[in-house]
Amino acid sequence: MFEVRTRKNRILLQVILLIMTIPYVLPLVQMVLGSLGGRGLYNYKAVWDTGVVPTYFRNSAIISFCVILLVYFFSMTAGFGFAKLYVRGKEIYFWLILVALTLPEVILLTPLFVTFQKLHMFNTFFAVILPSAALQIPFTILLTRNFDAGIPNEFMEAARIDGASIWQVFCHIILPLTKPIASAIIVLTLINAWNAYLLPLLFLQSPNLQVVTLLPQYFQGEFTNDQTKILAAAVLTAIPEITAYLLMQKNFEQGMSAGALK
């Protein structure tokens, strides 16, 4: 690992890193300070007193949990298959999946709307869960494939000699070794699913199905625009994903660096 030896270079590196973090930290600081403007913590109480916060958080938690399950399962299995199994034409399939990374979410809205209408899935959680997972899976498969490719084949060969099936190799050899990249995928998926805005806005019309990203709109309308309460709602919305990142920070960083380098 790169190491800065002299004190002068360490100080210079710290200054550079501090300058690089300012554009990211400053908006967060402004958001917190803005949420305390006016009547201070009363803004948070006003957000809670709306009575919709538990419902919105519950809906976002359900959607995020289901999206994480789908992304985790398909990423782990597909990444293992692309990295370690012989499948005729798997490179073609892999690059076809990666093509999905170039598709912006906006162009999919019309066909998704028509599809969910015909399947009677409009205004249900499935209308958000399925496309949210599908949009994230190509990138997570890329990360998992790169990570799995770095696992020595000798582990699999030894297990196969002992009579293990492919599924047993996957469950007992591959999955325990992929905890770092799994943590990274869980955090990334949680952030994307929790912050989903466009899909819930269009496909969830019932008030009891709304999610936390729509909470700030509760204080914004034709005749109201309470910025302090909007920022307070934004702070409350960000707490779960920040907590999840802090709890899984070590494995997340290991997974991201390993998935990028291997």
Image: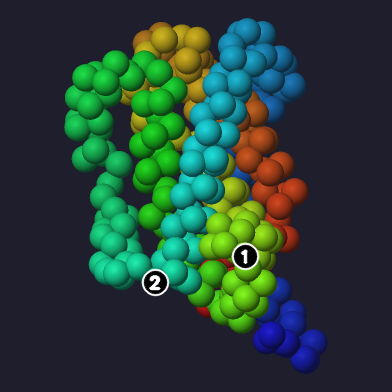
Q: Relative to residue 183, is residue 14 depicted above or below?
A: below
- Residue 90 screen position, x and y as percent: 32, 67
- Report which residue position mark 1 lands on: 164
Disc assigned to residue 86: 2
Q: Are the residues tagged 2 and 1 within 8 Å (C-beta)?
A: no
Q: Residue furthest right?
A: 7
At 51% across and 23% down in the image, what residue appears? 211
Q: Quadrant of residue 126?
A: top left
At 54% across and 70% down in the image, what residue appears? 147
Q: Relative to residue 107, is residue 100 depicted above or below?
A: below
Q: Is residue 212 left or right of residue 98?
A: right
Label 2, label 1: how far apart the Cα atoms are: 17 Å
Amino acid at pointer 2: Tyr
Q: Is residue 152 left or right of residue 140?
A: right
At 78% across and 91% down in the image, what residue appears? 6
- Residue 131 screen position, x and y as percent: 36, 37
Q: 149 or 89, which is in the foreground?
A: 89
Q: Relative to residue 205, is residue 244 depicted above or below?
A: below
Can residue 151 be seen from the camera position used here?
yes
Q: What sort of colour scheme is used for the picture?
A: rainbow
At 44% across and 23% down in the image, what residue appears? 125
Q: Secondary structure at mark 2?
A: loop
Disc assigned to residue 144: none
